[in-house]
Image: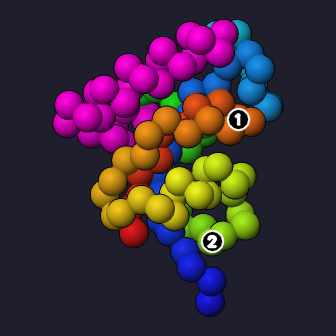
Amino acid sequence: MSEQVTASHILIMHEESSRSSETRSKDEAKTLINSVKKKVESGEEFATLASEFSDCPSGKNGGSLGNFGRGQMVKAFEDAAFTLNVGEVSDVVETEFGYHLIQRSS
């Protein structure tokens, strides 16, 4: 069986994001994801922040994406998720969908 991770994410989309209906600019999205990252770093609960800020439908489930293997996510997202240690939160990852913070669960 291929390597799997379990991860959650917070996605902040912007007007240039793929499949986005957001009107915020890329700069506004970058500022917002950085402020959410500071909240995570100061100890706020990742799942709570995901439900409050994430533009992804997974936000209502605390950002949970469940299990996924290599080749199932866009490369930048996958590369970040697979290099994290369990419980660790990524730096800001930019993909065609916007800016992500990723937390590995297992």
Name the outermost residue toward the left.
43
Q: Left or right of 24: which side holds 48?
A: left
Residue at coordinates 71% horizontally, 63% vertically from top-left? 72
Residue at 66 percent of width and 10 percent of height: 25
Seen in the picture, residue 49 relative to 70 is either above or below; the reply is above
Q: In which quarter of the image is the C terminus?
A: bottom left
Q: Main secondary structure of the magenta part?
A: helix
Q: Residues within 10 Å of mark 1 (few under 14, many from 20)?
A: some
- Residue of label 1: 97
Residue 49 sits above or below residue 29 on the image: below
Disc 2 crowd rating (10 Å Cα; few below 14, some 14-19, many 20+) is some
Give SS at disc 2: strand
Residue at the spot 73% in from the left edge and 67% down from the top edge? 71
- Residue 105: image location, x then y, percent: 38, 62
Instruction: Identify residue type, mark 1.
Output: Phe
Give, as a three-letter code, the residue at label 2: Gly
In which quadrant is the N terminus drawn? bottom right
In the image, which residues are magenta? 25-51
Q: Which residue is drawn at 34% across and 41% down?
A: 46
Q: Residue 69 carries which label?
A: 2
Q: Is residue 102 above or below residue 27?
A: below
Location of residue 70 in the rendering, given as x and y in whole percent from the top left corner: 66, 70
